[in-house]
């Protein structure tokens, strides 16, 4: 039996683990938190830090593993490409190209050179140089570590005092000790998740993104995205330009963008599974097995062995991450009758007494939603934190 290493075992990795097992692989998960719920879905768990490429390389060799699949984290994508390059594994981009896409400073340099639609940014490798740059900007600005996801270490600033604190915070959190600073573009946030076959966009899934109390953490998504028909051509052209220049392999290519003045500005790109069970609404919306597509492509299987024709029109649907509004022990989660008919599936891990330790990031579960009309989708997505309430003991 072939062995597949999925680089973590969070709830976000469960679709990948299940897809690997459905393929008949012996699935091994790793990561430095053995208590993550996803490990229980795998055949085997091995302790290790998936952001440590050399450590994962040793596990891969010790366990005689055949394939590697990134987890739903950028560090996983980077480690997977490192293993691929060292072991001549199929299904992954080169290590250097993976860094170009996933490290924000490298991506900005690439985008400037090849005129990709993204906000202009400056990168810095010292606090002092970033503070001097304050003399050259107008506010608001957004400051980001170059190597973190989920909004970690990200701050918007509108004066020098907040700017200075945000610079220090971003440097402290960045593993690479590098940051980017760019103008903050006010607009609506969206995803454009594509699948690449022979350097072309084969299909795409789009959605609107909403945040709850943490403005940099997506908690709700609903698609199709507002105005996607007006920007899909630009996004596809940028995608195929990047794929062609970097000679990228088949597989998922996920874009987060902000829409402002009827134009899309690409914020980030990832080449790995998006988190919080993102494959579930994609599979509902497009009628395809997105999880299997990702795993199969990362195992280097021939495209014809897993690809299928998606629906010609995306069905309306999305997902919502249940979150509280302060720390404490959960008593219950109440769902409005108005929303119950929209829920077609769910995955929750909270129980009475579950402790929320950091309400800005802790999640209690994910609900999967469908809608009968675009207006219903927008209305309920915008009000969803009023329709779903966490009560406390």
Image (spheres, rainbow, N blue to C red):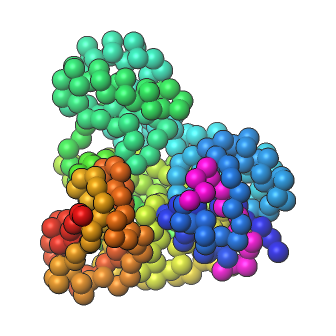
* Residue 35 placement (x, y as % from top left): 56, 59
Q: Residue at x 33, y 12 (%)?
A: 132
Q: Residue at x 17, y 72 (%)?
A: 387
* Residue 173 placement (x, y as % from top left): 45, 32
Classify the position of the C terminus by image quarter: bottom left
Q: Which residues are magenta?
A: 22-35
Is residue 31 a member of the stretch shown in magenta? yes
How many marks can you see? 0
Classify the position of the N terminus by image quarter: bottom right
The residue nearer to you, when weighing 99 against 60, is 60
Vertical order, 366 against 178 (above or below) = below
Residue 230 seen in render: no
The residue nearer to you, when weighing 361 against 140, is 361
Position of residue 180 in the picture relative to residue 322 (left or right): right
Q: Residue at x 81, y 50 (%)?
A: 87
The residue nearer to you, when weighing 77 against 190, is 77
Is residue 270 a member of the stretch shown in magenta? no
Q: Residue at x 22, y 56 (%)?
A: 325
Residue 291 seen in render: yes
The residue nearer to you, when weighing 161 against 39, is 39
Vertical order, 303 against 371 (above or below) = above
Position of residue 11 in the picture relative to residue 67 (left or right): left
Q: Main secondary structure of the magenta part?
A: loop
Position of residue 12 in the picture relative to residue 26 (left or right): left
* Residue 384 placement (x, y as % from top left): 20, 68
* Residue 319 placement (x, y as % from top left): 34, 71
Q: Quadrant of residue 227?
A: bottom left
């Amino acid at each position: 039996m072939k062995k597949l290493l999925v680089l973590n075992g969070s709830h976000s990795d469960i679709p990948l683990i299940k897809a690997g097992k459905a393929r008949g692989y012996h699935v091994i998960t790793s990561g430095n938190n053995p208590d993550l719920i996803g490990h229980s879905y795998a055949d085997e768990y091995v302790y290790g830090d998936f952001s440590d490429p050399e450590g994962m390389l040793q596990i891969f060799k010790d366990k005689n593993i055949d394939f590697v699949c990134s987890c739903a984290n950028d560090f996983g994508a980077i480690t997977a490409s490192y293993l691929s390059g060292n072991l001549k594994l199929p299904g992954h981009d080169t290590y250097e190209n993976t860094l170009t896409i996933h490290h924000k400073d490298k991506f900005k340099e690439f985008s400037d050179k090849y005129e990709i639609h993204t906000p202009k940014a400056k990168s810095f490798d010292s606090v002092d140089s970033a503070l001097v740059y304050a003399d050259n900007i107008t506010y608001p600005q957004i400051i980001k570590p170059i190597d973190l996801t989920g909004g970690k270490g990200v701050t918007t600033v509108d004066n020098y005092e907040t700017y200075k604190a945000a610079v220090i915070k971003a440097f402290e959190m960045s593993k690479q000790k590098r940051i980017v600073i760019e103008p903050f573009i006010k607009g609506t946030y969206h995803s454009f998740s594509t699948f690449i076959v022979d350097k072309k966009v084969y299909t795409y899934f789009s959605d609107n993104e909403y945040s709850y109390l943490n403005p940099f953490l997506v908690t709700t998504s609903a698609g199709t995205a507002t105005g996607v028909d007006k920007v899909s051509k630009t996004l596809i052209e940028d995608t195929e330009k990047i794929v062609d220049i970097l000679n990228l392999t088949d597989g998922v290519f996920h874009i987060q963008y902000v829409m402002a003045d009827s134009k899309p500005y690409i914020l980030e790109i990832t080449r790995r599974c998006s988190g919080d069970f993102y494959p579930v609404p994609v599979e509902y919306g497009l009628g395809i097995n997105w999880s299997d597509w990702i795993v199969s492509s990362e195992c280097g299987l021939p495209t014809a062995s897993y690809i299928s024709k998606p629906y010609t029109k995306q069905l309306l649907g999305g997902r919502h991450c249940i979150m509280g509004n302060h720390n404490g022990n959960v008593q219950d989660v109440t769902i409005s009758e108005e929303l119950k008919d929209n829920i077609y599936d769910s995955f929750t891990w909270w129980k009475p007494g579950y402790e929320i330790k950091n309400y800005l990031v802790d999640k209690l579960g994910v609900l999967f939603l469908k809608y009968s009309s675009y207006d219903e989708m927008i209305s309920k997505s915008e009000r969803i934190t009023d329709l779903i309430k966490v009560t406390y003991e």
